[in-house]
Amino acid sequence: MRSRWGTTPSQTVGPYLSLALPWEDGPWVVPEGTEGAVWIRGTVLDGQGEPVPDALIETWQADPEGRFDHPDDPRGRAGSGFRGFGRCPTDERGEYRICTLLPGILPSADGDQARHLDVSVFARGLLNRLVTRIYFEDQDNSGDPVLASVPQERRPTLVAARTGDGYRFDVRLQGAGETVFFAL
């Protein structure tokens, strides 16, 4: 901002995430003990590869049949209490976790979208959220039009690796191996 006294110095936002953004259900997209539930775990890393201990990961997804918990979903609203929304702050090691079900395939005008989670990343130093997606290495991602729009060499930054009880997806905010983020 410019004024008659000069330029206002640049400042970052936060870290206020722990005051207002965490919510009651936190990382539980589905209730504990839900059959077929998987954990999505990872670490948020800065440009130097250091953990970011005060970030927040937010996920939004379709249910296993590809329906959202939203009244405007043209296929009908997701049923049986599926929320489709998770939010988890990172801990002191920069780690987050989300318990959910694998989402269904989504029909779209450009071709079916592979199973994925939409992800928002909030962190100090970011004036706006960063938006990315999580795809799954053991699912068929070959026809997804969004993933196909990403250069081949960058696609691995969007694919979660299978683990014993779910998947691992690290988010690198900058630098070598930076996660692909989408402009909205």
Image: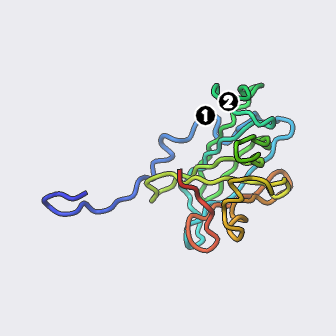
Q: Which residue is mark 1?
A: 24
- Side of 84 where 181 appears, left or right: left
Q: Which mark is residue 6?
A: none
Q: Identify the residue at horizontal 32%, vertical 62% (top origin).
A: 10
Q: Indicate the position of residue 127 as horizontal and vertical percent values.
A: 43, 54
Q: Identify the residue at horizontal 80%, vertical 37% (top origin).
A: 64
Measure how far apart labels 2 and 1 are at the Cα level.
25 Å
Disc 2 residue crowd, few under 14, some 14–19, many 20+, Cα 10 Å: few
Instruction: State which tag comes first along the sequence, 2 or 1.
Output: 1
Q: Identify the residue at horizontal 69%, vertical 36% (top origin).
A: 84
102, above or below 83, in the image? below
Disc 1 residue crowd, few under 14, some 14–19, many 20+, Cα 10 Å: few
Amino acid tagged 2: Asp
Which image quarter: residue 164? bottom right
Q: Indicate the position of residue 28 as horizontal and vertical percent values.
A: 70, 39
Q: Which mark is residue 73?
A: 2
Q: Indicate the position of residue 162 as horizontal and vertical percent values.
A: 83, 57
Amino acid tagged 1: Glu
- Compare residues 76 and 128 and report the one nearer the observer: 76
Which image quarter: residue 101? top right
- Side of 29 where 121 appears, left or right: left
